[in-house]
Image (cartoon, rainbow, N blue to C red):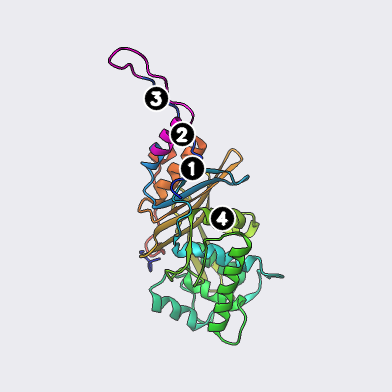
Amino acid sequence: MAAAAAAAVAAAAIILPAASASPDTTSTARPAASGPALKAKATAALSNKISAQGAFLVDGAGGKPLWSKAADTQRSVASTTKIMTAVVVLETSGVDLNRQVNVKQEYRDHVTENGASTADLRTGDTLTVRQLLHALLLPSGCDAAAALADSFGTGDTIGARTKSFIDAMNAKAASLGLTKTTYDSFDGLSPGSLSTPRDLATLARHAMADATFRDIVKQVSTKQEATNGRTYTWFNTNQLLGSYPGAIGIKTGTSTPAGPCLVFAATREGRTVIGVVLNDPNRFVSAATLLDSAFKSDTAVTMRLRQLPPGAQSD
């Protein structure tokens, strides 16, 4: 995650058309590939287009795996960690999304000390939990993550409260069966926030079942007003939104150990597909290519990425 800049393959692949058989030197036609051989060809063809070190594509409704690459290899996941941050907040018993949270200087210091992505929350401003979730998930604000962890953790100090919040993140991962997911930060700044493409896809399916989460992550931008009248404008770092027809989320992440990461989703003709690419320098094109394989389209070929305006956060 940068400040304002930045076993084996187990696949149930989308089956692509087989090439026409060619005659050999004796003019005897070779049988067309079928069954496992055809699937292997399709998998190899798609693999050649995906630059991710790890990837997973799943049907959003039933959870059927559609394609994978090193799906169970544990990696650093950078700001995709914030999906779990949001889940823990949203699933807190009796959560009040209109609860007001005062921005502390410590949240800004956290960003400055780590050179982290920020929602540029101003000390002394008061925002609601719902607004902080926007600040967390669109510009990938580590200050917003700190505010939420401090507000929803328990203890007598900021350190104690944020630690208890991270403990809650790990407990939620365990309850969801994410056996290869562990967190040691609330925002993914630490390389010790680890997961796998398969686990992240499971988490994403769970998160997208929440209407508030779903509504936030699909927004290209938002304007939110603090109680003192200050207006915040945040742009979504997920450039797939507004570029790939049907894209509805979910979260970017970038750091030196993790590389560029993306958890993504799109809906077409009533079908939702969710995917993950980890450590992928071409994450948006790879995501579009994987979605095309599910939707049987060729959008990735002509897709032009939405550009972030000057000064917007990248992640």
Q: Say whether marks 4 and 3 touch (CB < 8 Å).
A: no
Identify the residue position indicated by label 2 in the image. 39
Identify the residue position indicated by label 3 in the image. 19
Q: Say whether marks 1 and 4 touch (CB < 8 Å).
A: no
4 vs 3, front mark: 3
Q: Mark 1 to mark 4: distance in Å?
A: 19 Å
Q: Is residue 98 left or right of residue 22?
A: right
**Which one is nearer the viewer's eye here, 202 or 39?**
39
* Dot 1 or dot 4, earlier in sequence: 1
User: Residue 164 sits in which quadrant?
Assistant: bottom right
Q: Mark 2 to mark 3: distance in Å?
A: 13 Å
Identify the residue position indicated by label 1 in the image. 11
Question: Does residue 55 show up magenta in the picture?
Answer: no
Counting from the top left corner in percent of width and height, residue 54 is at 42, 52
Identify the residue position indicated by label 4 in the image. 204
Secondary element at image label 1? loop
